[in-house]
Image (tube, grey):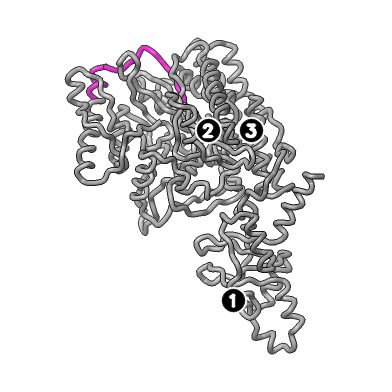
């Protein structure tokens, strides 16, 4: 949870003051490291659980987080997130031993049940998922920003760093997503299960590098976020969505290395944790400032442990997938943690616990297996492995020790699960819990199935039977129901339309059922060309665009028929072009227009097609056939 007592840097004096405190925080940390102040005799774990709030009827986002917080009162474990449709639970740190995983799982379930009980009156329930399948682009507008000063300040500060005219998403998978957005609230599309491991200061470098090296196989087996706005993209599209949602960079004539604020890192950690902080201060402008005036360097020289608040504020605005963290333990000693941010939320609490158990066991087990992971692998391969894992998930092939090429499943089954098991045994974790949670990882690898594979296979099957929106709604309904059973995802049956007991298409927008694979023509094209194209593609309507992509007309099969029926001589045919027969200035709608409004427009104007336009750009088309498909689906349900 981020510190809420922060604000955007508004003037030069405030920036200079904050930078002085930030530099003193780094110096104070170096002093504490040099004089061995850090807690090194205990190992704790912790976690943060993010979740999506979903309307039970529509299965779309339910932006009632503030109402839920107000109803539940002051709960130290519960907090808001960036968007009004997200909440976050902060779990209690506990010592890494014995029944810690079972206790953590129980704590999560207790809190989730309490939240679900309190939000029921809002027709809302919790969904654990990396990216909500039914999420829509317009759900991520600033109206859904949680009304807290920190979030507003963060959005404004990121916007001020934007070099280009907008934020751009470009992700290629089975499908392709290319779109622009006007705010960094796209970040709110992601929900994670963040796991913390406390490590000793003298082993931080070794442990951090191990965390980097094992990120790829852990990500591959845990991937759970392949669907974005109805597109099948990366197996863990959450990674790309987060990075691109707040990427303020733009292209230049000459290549220059600008690092994104969300990043994996570019090299091994060589000397000290402070190297990461120094690197981030060097590369990234300050976005937020805290309200502290404390001189932390003076404090340590006076024998006091500082909170390093300025450093923590800046660290909270640089999003490394393995983030270094500083904290103060209940006994007053400072400690260091590695925060694993790569894991998605869901699809069940048990799946999350298996992911955490696998990662934590690997961290300890790998530390015993290798003295220095840097001597086993090139960092370029580590980075490349991570990029493969987020794209291809469980289907990845990695470069491992000695330049060996090995599939994700073989690596996990033959090498990493045994190492994780040894690590967990070293921490004296209950044998039954080791078998339970690592058994889930083993089951996924043997069946070659994880959350991402289940979602992709389910959606591909359902797309053939229904509209995009109905398929996504059915998948969301299926996840909600299966989460309650707590059966791990690799044992789930594929989603089915019958998983969606009630479907309410009147609640959906044009963007959720429009056609986006468009065939268009220009006004100077010959009529025979558009006629042939419409015949080849079995189209009844074709939009007419100008050279800038603006919709200026519409050609229908009826207008083509009228033209050919009334054609009298070849000279007329030779001179006629699309402009002569097209319907000029057609009625258009926006992607946010409701299906009900679109139907009323068609009825009012006695038309069978509506081009869909966003900020003058043609983005889709809806026809009477789209409404017939939805009606047919509803009739099937009634039958």
Q: Mark 1 points at which residue?
A: 523
Query: Neighbour class for label 1 at 10 Å: few (<14), some, many (≥20)?
Result: many
**Magenta stretch?**
30-47
Residue 45 painted magenta = yes
Q: Name the residue under label 3.
A: 480
Give whichever of discs 2 and 3 has the lower sequence position.
2
Is 17 or 489 nearer to us in this picture? Answer: 17
Q: Percent position (x, y) of residue 506?
A: 66, 50
Element under disc 1: loop
Asked if disc 2 and disc 3 are in contact, CB closer than 8 Å, the reply is: no
Inter-mark Cα distance, 1 to 2: 49 Å
Residue in the picture at 22% in, 23% down:
31
In this orientation, does residue 420 appear?
no
Which is in the foreground here, disc 1 or disc 2?
A: 2
Q: Mark 2 points at which residue?
A: 51
Q: Percent position (x, y) of residue 28?
A: 23, 26
313 on left or right of 475 = left
């Amino acid at each position: 949870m981020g510190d809420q007592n922060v604000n955007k840097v508004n003037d030069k004096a405030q920036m200079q003051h904050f930078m002085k405190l930030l530099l003193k925080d780094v110096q104070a940390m170096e002093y504490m490291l040099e004089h061995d102040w850090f807690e090194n005799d205990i190992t704790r774990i912790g976690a943060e659980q993010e979740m999506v709030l979903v309307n039970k009827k529509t299965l779309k986002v339910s932006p009632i987080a503030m109402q839920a917080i107000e109803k539940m009162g002051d709960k130290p474990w519960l907090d808001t997130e960036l968007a009004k449709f997200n909440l976050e639970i902060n779990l209690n740190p506990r010592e890494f031993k014995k029944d810690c995983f079972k206790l953590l799982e129980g704590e999560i379930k207790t809190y989730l049940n309490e939240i679900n009980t309190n939000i029921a009156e809002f027709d809302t329930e919790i969904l654990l998922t990396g990216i909500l399948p039914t999420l829509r682009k317009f759900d991520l507008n600033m109206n859904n920003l949680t009304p807290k000063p920190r979030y507003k300040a963060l959005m404004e500060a990121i916007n001020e760093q934007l070099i280009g005219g907008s934020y751009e998403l470009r992700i290629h998978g089975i499908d392709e997503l290319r779109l622009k957005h006007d705010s960094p609230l796209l970040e709110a599309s992601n929900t994670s299960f963040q796991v913390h491991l406390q490590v000793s200061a003298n082993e931080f470098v070794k442990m951090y590098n191990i965390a980097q090296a094992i990120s790829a196989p852990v990500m591959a087996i845990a991937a759970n976020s392949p669907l974005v706005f109805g597109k099948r993209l990366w197996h863990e599209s959450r990674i790309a969505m987060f990075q691109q949602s707040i990427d303020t960079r733009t292209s230049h004539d000459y290549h220059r290395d600008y690092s994104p604020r969300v990043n994996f890192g570019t090299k091994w950690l060589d000397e000290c944790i402070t190297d990461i902080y120094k690197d981030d201060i060097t590369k990234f402008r300050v976005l937020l400032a805290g309200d502290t005036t404390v001189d932390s360097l003076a404090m340590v020289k006076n024998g006091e442990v500082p909170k390093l608040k300025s450093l923590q504020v800046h660290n909270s605005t640089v999003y490394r997938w393995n983030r270094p963290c500083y904290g103060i333990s209940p006994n007053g000693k400072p400690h260091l943690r590695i925060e694993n941010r790569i894991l998605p939320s869901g699809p069940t609490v048990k799946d999350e616990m298996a992911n955490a158990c696998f990662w934590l066991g690997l961290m300890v087990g790998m530390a015993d297996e290798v003295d220095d992971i840097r001597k086993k692998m090139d960092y370029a391969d580590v980075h490349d492995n991570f990029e493969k894992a987020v794209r291809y998930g469980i289907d990845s092939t990695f470069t491992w020790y000695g330049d060996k090429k090995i599939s994700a499943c073989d690596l996990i089954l033959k090498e990493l699960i045994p190492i994780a098991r040894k690590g967990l045994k070293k921490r004296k974790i209950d044998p039954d819990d080791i078998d339970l949670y690592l058994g889930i990882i083993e089951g996924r690898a043997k069946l070659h199935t994880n959350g991402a594979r289940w979602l992709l296979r389910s959606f591909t099957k359902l797309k053939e039977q229904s509209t995009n929106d109905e398929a996504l709604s059915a998948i969301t309904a299926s996840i909600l129901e299966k989460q309650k059973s707590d059966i791990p995802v690799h044992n789930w049956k594929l989603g089915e339309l019958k998983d969606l007991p009630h479907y309410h298409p009147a609640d959906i927008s044009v963007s959720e059922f429009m056609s986006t694979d468009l065939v268009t023509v220009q006004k100077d094209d010959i009529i025979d060309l558009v006629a042939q194209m419409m015949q080849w593609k079995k189209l009844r309507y074709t939009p007419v665009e100008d050279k800038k992509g603006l919709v200026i007309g519409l050609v229908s099969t009826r207008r083509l028929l009228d033209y050919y029926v009334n054609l009298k001589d070849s000279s007329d045919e030779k001179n006629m072009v699309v402009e002569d027969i097209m319907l000029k200035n057609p009625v258009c709608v926006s992607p946010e227009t409701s299906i009900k409004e679109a139907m009323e427009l068609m009825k009012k104007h006695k038309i069978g097609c509506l081009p869909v336009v966003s900020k003058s750009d043609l983005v889709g088309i809806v026809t009477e056939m789209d409404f017939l498909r939805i009606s047919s689906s509803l009739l099937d349900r009634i039958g």
